[in-house]
Amino acid sequence: MRGGCEAIDSDWACRSNRPMDDTGGIAEVTSGGGVMRFPAAKPLRLDSGATLSPLEVAYKTYGQLNAEKSNAVLVCHALTLDQHVASAHPTTGKPGWWSRAVGPGLPIDTDRYFVICANVVGGCMGTTGPASTNPETGEPYGLSFPVITIGDMVRAQAMLVETLGIETLFAVVGGSMGGMQVLQWAADFPEKIFCAVCIAAAARHSAQNIAFHEVGRQAVMADPDWRGGAYEKAGVRPEKGLAVARMAAHITYLSEAALQRKFGRELQRDGLSWGFDADFQVESYLRHQGASFVDRFDANSYLYITRAMDYFDLGAKHGGVLAEAFRKARAVRFCVLSFSSDWLYPTAESRDVVRALNAAGCRASFAEIESDKGHDAFLLDEPQLDATLRGFMAAQAQARGLA
Amino acid sequence: MRGGCEAIDSDWACRSNRPMDDTGGIAEVTSGGGVMRFPAAKPLRLDSGATLSPLEVAYKTYGQLNAEKSNAVLVCHALTLDQHVASAHPTTGKPGWWSRAVGPGLPIDTDRYFVICANVVGGCMGTTGPASTNPETGEPYGLSFPVITIGDMVRAQAMLVETLGIETLFAVVGGSMGGMQVLQWAADFPEKIFCAVCIAAAARHSAQNIAFHEVGRQAVMADPDWRGGAYEKAGVRPEKGLAVARMAAHITYLSEAALQRKFGRELQRDGLSWGFDADFQVESYLRHQGASFVDRFDANSYLYITRAMDYFDLGAKHGGVLAEAFRKARAVRFCVLSFSSDWLYPTAESRDVVRALNAAGCRASFAEIESDKGHDAFLLDEPQLDATLRGFMAAQAQARGLA
């Protein structure tokens, strides 16, 4: 550990009891991690101009860092996910969100790589966010938490990685908002990464995506229990609003074909209720998604992280020329992946990224993976994704001398 | 007028002062109409098994019924629209919602046709709906209003048409939920229609569409001012919840391309607010859509009408064989239209309708109209739509001897 940071809460380091996942993978992963606290002397400088201090970053690790410290893989998580990428979620008890890709013998092989995953700044799973205590008031930040960006999330990750004594990451990998972070890493810290995998993401948030996020935020803010963001102090939670936000968002993570295949017009019971109960299975499914989400996520974190995604526009600083953002990333080996049925981050947006990478002279592989599962395909059983990820990682490991 | 019904509220009959619309059409339309009250002896028998009485149907008419009563065109409206198809909306003062298609010299030519448009059962613009007085309690129905279907809406329209002394409609025309009603007319009253135009609709509501409707309903019901549907009695209105519902729905009426073209990532002001104000124009636009909607629409009507759409599955009664629903409609001339960028009612669903019409031996024209405007294209400036509608109507008028 460097720079006077302290790792706290190390009881998080544990051997996970990962239940059997639906791929049949039951290997246990040796996991570590904890919460890294950065002192006042090392504040997080934010894109807004503000600083955040003290900063705590909650993270998990899997596998072993080699002696050369050359086998570290940073996995960046999506909007509502967290650091529990390959071990059970402490609240829900469910397997890690990418247990099917991260683990011994899996595409991100914890027998070979030292995998790090950190909860993003603004999150609610241990990293400093709007539910943390504002040192100026001694109360939860709420809306006094500064607006953060994808760049801020990445800067906090870079502080963590440096403190762990790692100069260069072998890989940065992520899907959805995680993919945005991957691109931001390539733009801001190209010298610190060997390769980069950006899945189902884009270099800027589209008008339609901003629109859906705004619906979610308005749903949260419309809930009287939101209390202008100060619900924690009031001992309430805007659960109904957050559930509605999640329901709307959840539709965008799927595809019409997937919804049709999974649910169609199937009913919950024999016959219609002739009322407003959940008649259709798809209604019941969505209600469940909303209800279970509020148990594991903080409403203000939802506002801040969606805002960070909306603000994301990697080319903006460069007069809208995305390639300029990647000018210094020529040595980074990129893999860009999209899914054919993803309408949240359609393939066209991944192609824009690849075009910019090519224009910048970077090495970029690109694949559109055929899937009817929509945006969420990156989390699901997609053999083509597994094969592509496995092949890319293995080839880069060889190039890096890790094989 | 037949059957002891009375036309009330006839002050609605007026010469509209339609402001100039964006097509440059400024012709005034002679309009009539009012509210038709059906006595207890003529209740509306509902698909649920319940009956609705007394029933009032608010409607508008444009143009003159000819001596043979052979030139009547029924226009069926979409979810949140109403009978004010070609004259100013009494609440908003805006031009009729289809002023660009219905009027003198327009595709649905009020110089030639007698156009009728009625507010649907369950609506909130004068036809009996959840805000109407429940005769059993003397209070607004609220959730004691029976769940209604597209079939019920059409049955009420048929009662109106019959009472107006019209045996056969020259045409039934509608887009979106209006298109569903057109198909229902063809299934239930094929002998009463000469031709039918179904625009941007489907023969059954998809899982994704049910999902979006459920989000909207949950948003309304999450608002504490909804009061279990009894908000009117309490003197409040679930405005925030209804606005969120509208915002979510509104995104589905557009297309990603249209949002990108109209708004992209354009900001409201110079620079970001670093907060939760509407930074992006698309946010401000959506907020406006939500806020203005609650001024003109009733929250319970929104619940009931979305439910009617979700329940719509024209083939279900026929063992899922849609063609069976159209078996008796062989004499009806159909025109089915879709828009290439409509993801709410994609072209594939119109093709399913056309396939079933063909299988039933009906005469069906079909066109997919190229447009990037999404579902709302049916209400917007689409010259190809105008031309197709004009051509179809004129050809059918000739066949009907109206030319």
Image (cartoon, coloured by chain):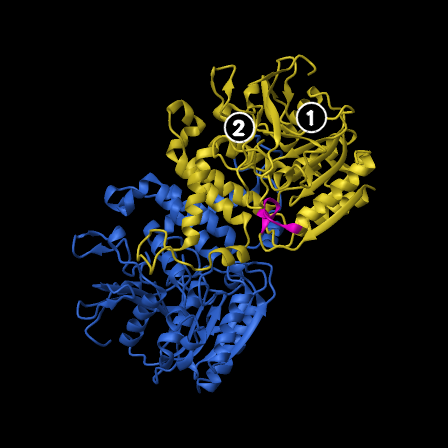
Chain colours: A yellow, B blue
Looking at the picture, tell me which residue is in the foreground, A211 or B221: B221
The amino acid marked with disc number 1 is: Ala
Task: Give whichever of A159, A300 is nearer the camera.
Answer: A159
Whether residue A382 is in magenta: the answer is yes
Chain of the residue that carries numbered disc 2 in the rendered image = A
Work out which quarter of the rendered image holds the N terminus of chain A and state it.
top right
For residue A181, above or below residue A235:
below
Name the residue tied to disc 2: A125
Label 1 vs label 2, nearer the camera:
2
Asked if one can make out residue A323 in the rendered structure from this viewpoint, the answer is: no
- Crowdedness near tag 1: few (<14), some (14–19) or many (≥20) residues, C-alpha within 10 Å: many
Magenta stretch: helix, strand or loop mostly? helix
Q: Which mark is residue A158?
A: 1
Query: Is label 2 in a helix, a strand or a loop?
Result: loop
Q: A32 above or below B220?
A: above
Figure disc tally: 2
Q: Which residues are magenta?
A: A374-383
Give the distance between the C-alpha atoms of the residues marked 1 and 2, in whole angstroms.
Answer: 18 Å
Q: Is residue B211 left or right of residue A344?
A: left
Q: Nearer the viewer, residue B139 or A355?
A: A355
